[in-house]
């Protein structure tokens, strides 16, 4: 099956590309997951306002997006979310996920309270 799928690829080109991109796996993984966080944050606004985000709320979303990404990114990095295989998630991993997301929620609520008059 793999032979048919990779029949058109030059194997040396594929292995060369993989060997060059493997050292950059961790930063690319972080960028990809932060992109998913940004899409979920924007999607939550889209769902909240049923597709028509008011101008004031759109400005708020754009202004708070870097704060949300930095807080969640740092907490997820602290809790080692960017390590391991997500294919095999155990109950201790679930506990870690709940702890990190709850902590990020509390930090974002505190920041919202102090940063917004």
Image: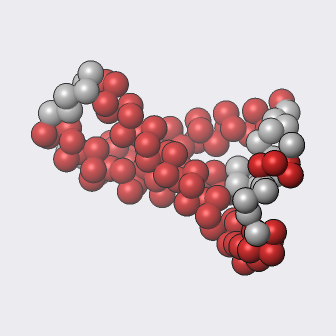
Position of residue 112 relative to residue 19, above or below, is: above
Residue 7: x and y in percent read: 79, 56
- Looking at the image, residue 4 sits to the left or right of residue 74; the answer is right
14 relative to 36 in the view: left or right: right
- Residue at 51% over, 45% down: 36
Residue at the limit of the structure toward the left, as seen here: 55
Q: Nearer the viewer, residue 42 or 95?
A: 42
Which one is nearer the viewer's eye here, 93 or 89? Answer: 89
Q: Is residue 114 left or right of residue 9?
A: left
Q: Nearer the viewer, residue 99 or 51?
A: 51
Closest to the observer, 17 or 11: 11
| x 77%, y 42%: residue | 86
Q: How many marks?
A: 0
Residue at 20% across, 38% down: 57
For the rendered model, the colour scheme is: secondary structure
Image coordinates of residue 47 in percent, x first then y, are 34, 25
Q: Position of residue 75 (x, y in %)?
A: 60, 52
Q: Quadrant of residue 22?
A: bottom right
The quarter of the image holding the C terminus is top left
Which part of the image, by quadrant, shows the N terminus?
top right
């Amino acid at each position: 099956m793999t032979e048919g799928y990779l029949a058109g690829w030059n194997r040396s080109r594929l292995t060369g590309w993989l060997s060059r991109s493997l050292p950059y796996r961790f930063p690319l993984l972080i960028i990809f997951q932060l992109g998913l966080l940004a899409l979920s944050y924007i999607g939550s606004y889209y769902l909240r306002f049923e597709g028509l985000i008011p101008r004031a709320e759109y400005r708020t979303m754009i202004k708070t997006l870097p704060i949300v990404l930095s807080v969640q990114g740092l907490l997820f990095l602290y809790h080692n979310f960017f390590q391991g295989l997500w294919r095999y998630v155990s109950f201790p991993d679930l506990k870690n996920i709940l702890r990190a997301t709850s902590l990020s929620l509390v930090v974002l609520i505190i920041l919202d309270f102090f940063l917004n008059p």
